[in-house]
Amino acid sequence: MRMAAVRWFAAVALLAAASVSCAAEEPAPPAKAPTIQVNRTVTLSTASGPRTALVHRPANLPRNAPLVVVMHGAYGTAEHTKASFGWDALADRDGFEVVYPNGYGRFWNAGSCCGSPHARNVDDVEFLHRLTEQLVATDGVDPRRVYAVGMSNGAMMAYAWACAHPDDVAGIGAVAGALVARCDPAPAMTVVAIHGSADRSVPINGGVGPKSVSKYNYPALSQTLAPFLAADGCLPTPTRTEKAPVQLNTWSCASDRSILLAVVNGMGHDYPGARPADAVKRVLRQPPGPLDATTFLWTNLRSSVLS
């Protein structure tokens, strides 16, 4: 009887040891990927001090999604641009990430213009380069599908960035802006521009606009687009279609890039389709605009990919 009990306890001990051994050999469950907030602020240390940007990443966005970098105009902010231009809703619908960087002192050093960042020689090109590098590393966005979009001084910055770092950007979306940076040679790249024929800040035909905050002598829009048309191997004369008040100019190009220009007749220095940032004004009924700039830019940029 005593021997049977000893054998029974020994068997139980062996079973327990085997269970422990099996449990120890079972692989640990894979660690969950860190959750990225839908809306967050990122900060970068730069030679000009800390720089910030607002990031909107739709929930459950997969890796290798496109990234749109949206830059405000003179005296603007990332917060105002995010609230007014409608990029967040489009990102949620079409599946891409959008980032709104803040300029230095509410301006961008776009080459030979504008404001305090130009006066202090702030390296905004490097800031944007490092910002996208960080988002590629942390958020897994596709480095071959980064698009630079801007309004006014922000559009100038989009041109300057693409000219200085052509491997950063797959396409430019410029509203009411001009090329004021050195761009020789210009990169072969898709450019989508929107401009009002009655713009008195950055005149479509160039010069110092009577309402310009910088008093800069801007080149004509035709001069801005010329180096990109040459780089893309485009025919000199575009195909024009009219849907009043918008005239759409499309150039036929030898490369797989494209150049488009939408001229809104009678429009001033505006971003077509923008909503008031003020919450009270936003709920008031707004008259339908002739063009939704955000949708137009994205539709014509999204197929461009860096080779």
Image: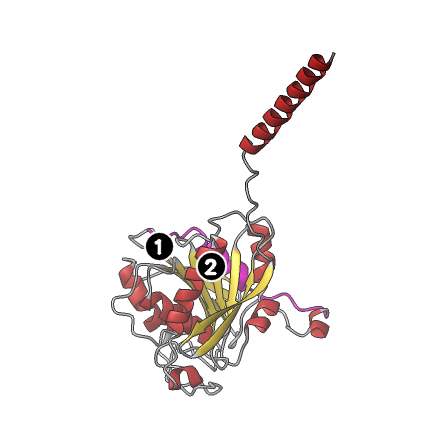
Q: Circle 2: is it few (<14), some (14-19), or many (20+) Cα within 10 Å? A: some
Q: Mark 1: few, some, or many residues within 10 Å (few <14, many ≥20)?
A: many
Q: Which colour scheme is used?
A: secondary structure
Q: Residue 145: horizontal and vertical position, in percent?
A: 42, 54
Identify the residue shown where x is 35% and y is 81%. 112
Of the residues shown, which amino acid type is indicated by label 2?
A: Leu
Asked if residue 18 lies left or right of residue 176, the reply is right
- The answer to whether 250 is drawn above or below residue 214 in the figure is above
Q: Where is residue 30 in the image (x, y as percent from the top left)?
A: 55, 40
Relative to residue 285, is residue 78 drawn left or right? left
Q: What is the C-alpha distance between the residues marked 2 and 1?
A: 25 Å
The quadrant in which residue 1 appears is top right
Q: From where the camera sits, is residue 262 visible?
A: no
Picture layout, residue 199 above or below residue 10: below
SS of the residue at dot 1? loop
Residue 103 rendering spot, x and y as whole percentages: 48, 76
Residue 46 is marked as none
What is the number of the mark on residue 257? 1
> Closer to the observer: label 2 or label 1?
2
Q: What residue type is labelled 1?
A: Arg
Looking at the image, which is closer to me, 21 or 218? 21
Kindly identify which residue carries mark 2: 135
